[in-house]
Amino acid sequence: MALPISYNLRNLVVRKTTTIMTALGIALTVAVLLAVLALVHGLQTAFQSTGNPLQVLVMRKGSTAELSSAMTPENFQTLKSMPGIARDGNDPMASLEMITVINLPSVDSPDGMNISLRGLLPIGVKMRDGLKLETGRWFQPGQREVVVGKSISKRYPGARMGEKLRFGRGEWEVVGVMDAGQAAANSEIFGDLNQISSDFNRSDGLSSVLLRATDQAAVSALINSLNDDRRLGVEAQTEKSYWDAQTSSAAPLQFLGLFISIIMAVGSSFAAMNTMYAAVARRAREIGTLRVLGFSRGSILFSFLLESLLLAIIGGLIGCLLVLPLNNITTGIGSFVTFSEIAFNFRVSPEIMLIGIAFAIFMGALGGLFPARMAARKEILTALREI
């Protein structure tokens, strides 16, 4: 004969102070875990949303990032004439680009953070799928004008519409704010390639070339052809692959967050264990009475374990509620690959909340198993004599 769940719920209500304190301890542990997972998920979403599977990124052989790559205009002329490249009217869909970093004061760091500045051709803007203007207009070739990502506009007061940025050889006017959805372009500043490369004395030392193939078969053929061409000395990969590899920036955060969560989980499990041990000690006569009434040891073990799990579920739900306000909040971290800040949004998805509830249940099971066993193993006469 099993004890009804209402019995456990009434016990939690009667012991409301200890129930609340233990549930809050579990809730804080779950909230820390969910906050880290939401942070990592948001960063991964930003990278995984970037790139077109039909586009090929070409860098100098041995380069792991555009910032450390070098590409000459002569190489670009050879690359854009390769077979299998799509065309926009009469022009090949090939963009020679230069990327560097500039320092701007942010809302979090008055001393400034490194931001990716990308010089590109007008065709390069067209090749960014889903990229659109939120406000203003696109930069004009030959002018010191830039368009900033919407995340840059939010986090950097000096990079908002109509402001002037000082880098290179002069001032650059912010003429537009672009929206790339969840893509990494939200964390970049776009400007005219020729003007930016001239200001940084890099007219012959650019960064990369972005090519769009006609179809998936042409992508593979183009990559193989470029990687096998020793004369060019370049390395090609799909744009998606390049940005997917940047998710390594999230690994240290994920490790640190999980390490802290595990330490807190041990503490929360002990708190739940102490709560349940105290409940067993106070309810010794009650346990004896239940045994006299015919409830088996297994029923009592299951009942006390269920009570601990209910306590943990309450804590898990509170933890989910605590972390929900973080959803879609914009933040940023520095990347060890690009040496610049990447802005992105926290992403509290239903899957992440389910992980939090499962984590809470695990803590509840760990903290309730031993007290439940102790309750089930009490002898009837011994239990009835205890006060």
Image (cartoon, rainbow, N blue to C red):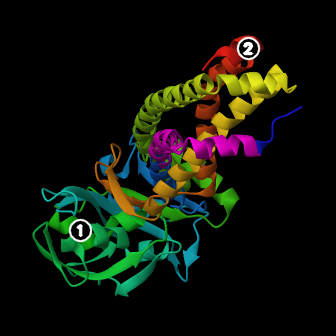
Q: Quadrant of residue 251?
A: top left
Asked whether the viewer can see residue 306, the reply is: yes
Image coordinates of residue 36 in percent, x first then y, are 45, 46
Q: Which mark is residue 313?
A: none
Three-letter amino acid code of the residue under disc 1: Tyr
Question: Which corner quadrant holds the N terminus?
Answer: top right
17 magenta-colored:
yes
In this rendering, the count of numbered labels is: 2
Image coordinates of residue 238 in percent, x first then y, are 55, 53
Q: Nearer the viewer, residue 113 or 288?
A: 288
The residue located at (21%, 85%) in the rendering is 162
Image coordinates of residue 157 in percent, x first then y, are 21, 72
Magenta-drawn segment = 6-34
* Label 2 crowd bin: few (<14), some (14–19), many (20+), radius 10 Å: some
Could you tell whether 108 is left or right of 288 in the image? left
Could you tell whether 30 is left or right of 195 in the image? right
The residue located at (49%, 60%) in the rendering is 324
Asked whether the viewer can see residue 379, the reply is: no
Q: Quadrant of residue 302?
A: top right
Q: Secondary structure at mark 2?
A: loop
Q: Is 17 situated above or below 382?
A: below
250 magenta-colored:
no
Q: Nearer the viewer, residue 38 or 89?
A: 38
Q: Which mark is residue 377?
A: 2
Q: Quadrant of residue 97?
A: bottom left
Q: Earlier in the sequence, mark 2 or mark 1?
A: 1
State the predominant SS element of the stretch in magenta: helix
Q: Residue furthest bottom?
A: 136
Residue at the spot of label 1: 156
The residue located at (59%, 26%) in the rendering is 282
Three-letter amino acid code of the residue under disc 2: Arg
The residue located at (40%, 35%) in the rendering is 256
